[in-house]
Amino acid sequence: CVRSETHQGATSGQGGIILGFSQIGAESAWRKCNTGSIQQAAEESGVQLLFANAEQKQENQIKAMRSFIAYQVDVIGFVPIVADGWDNILREAMDAGIPVLVTDRKIHTEDDRLYAGFIGTDSEQEGREAAFFLLKKFARLGNQDEADGKPVRIIEISGTEGSSVALGRAAGFREALADHPEFTIIHSQSGDFLRSKGYEIMRNLLEVYSDFEVVFSHNDGMTLGILDAMREAGIRPGKDVVIVTIDAEQAAIDALRRGEVNCVIECNPKTGPAIMSLAKRLAQGEKIPRLLHVDETVFSEYDDLSSVAPRGY
Ligand code: GYE
């Protein structure tokens, strides 16, 4: 993972703080890049990072956060694997006077004051962008007109159940298609953001469904598995079936260039420098913005891809 150019670090160089960080795991290339960005940025900005990998278990995250509190870190940062179930541990941190930064995935809480702020991606918007591409694509193919009655049947492979990212991408996608009843989601299933599950699920679905026009996959890892399953079954992804995916890993951009994927929505994992900057501000007792969304773009078969820089993940 290459370092992000978007260092906002006014505080860079002051260092001296301890950040306890609970990462959810290493389920995807995106996640590995996100971890690399955080570790590298901590090193470069003199933040002492206590890093814990939760191996996809919320209980491990809560344990790690409890140990950060016992250690009296200056700031706690975490990627909530799912949106619910954080209020108690956040209260413990608040009682200990330790500010908490939520990153990448959002949480549902009874009381928003339990955490200092959020920085990450806008999942709803990513879902909307996936839908906007389909509206464009099928308008070009000439069957967006409801009068011609041609349905666009969609299979959705979603991310980890209960994660804000899967919920947001699904919600944004549906919202943007709400006025276009010709687009119908005929099947939706979680592949847990894992390539192996994307493959397995698509293999099974191809025995059940013979006719569908679109696969909307919530991340590139699952998409790569989906492409493998389709090729094995003699289906040409990107041609026989329209493929829309999220993350913009290098492998997905390569597949887009080969014509096996039709649209890739970027999700930016390189938040390490911004996280360090926010952590330092929190450690100094400053307020930070409640909500910071990172910049993201969309790459599709309608774009000139010749100038897309190597992705680094
Ligand atoms: O899309 C996926 C992953 O939370 C935005 O988690 C993140 C998602 C990302 O592992 O690949």
Image: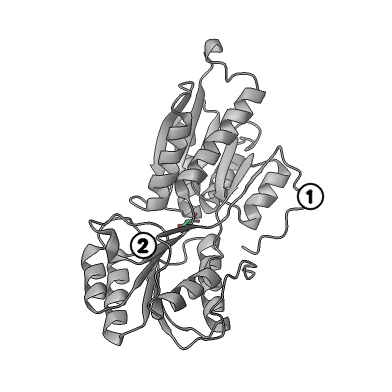
Q: Where is the C terminus found, in terms of image quarters? A: bottom right
Q: Is residue 168 above or below residue 278?
A: above
Residue furthest bottom in the image: 16
Q: In this rendering, would 58 be left or right of 273?
A: left
What distance separates the C-alpha of mark 1 from that of mark 2? 36 Å
Q: Where is the N terminus found, in terms of image quarters? A: bottom right
User: Which disc is residue 144 wearing?
Assistant: none
Instruction: Give the residue at mark 2.
Output: 80
Ligand 1: does it lie within 8 Å of the C-beta at label 1?
A: no
Please tell me in which quadrant of the rendered image residue 262 appears.
top right
Q: Secondary structure at mark 2?
A: loop
Could you tell me if the residues under marks 1 and 2 are in contact, i.e. CB atoms within 8 Å? Answer: no
Residue 127 % position (x, y):
49, 42
Task: Tell me the crowding category of disc 1: few under 14, some 14 to 19, or many 20 or more residues within 10 angstroms, Cα based.
Answer: few
111 or 127, nearer to the observer: 111
Q: Secondary structure at mark 1?
A: loop
**Residue, x 71% and y 60% (percent of image)?**
310
Q: Is residue 131 above or below residue 190?
A: above
Residue furthest right in the image: 306
Three-letter amino acid code at the position of disc 1: Ser
Three-letter amino acid code at the position of disc 2: Pro
Please tell me in which quadrant of the rendered image residue 236 appears.
top right
Residue 119 % position (x, y):
45, 62
User: Which disc is residue 306 wearing?
Assistant: 1
Instruction: Indicate how the structure is coloured in the image.
Output: one colour
Q: Earlier in the sequence, mark 1 or mark 2?
A: 2
Task: Tell me the crowding category of disc 2: few under 14, some 14 to 19, or many 20 or more residues within 10 angstroms, Cα based.
Answer: many
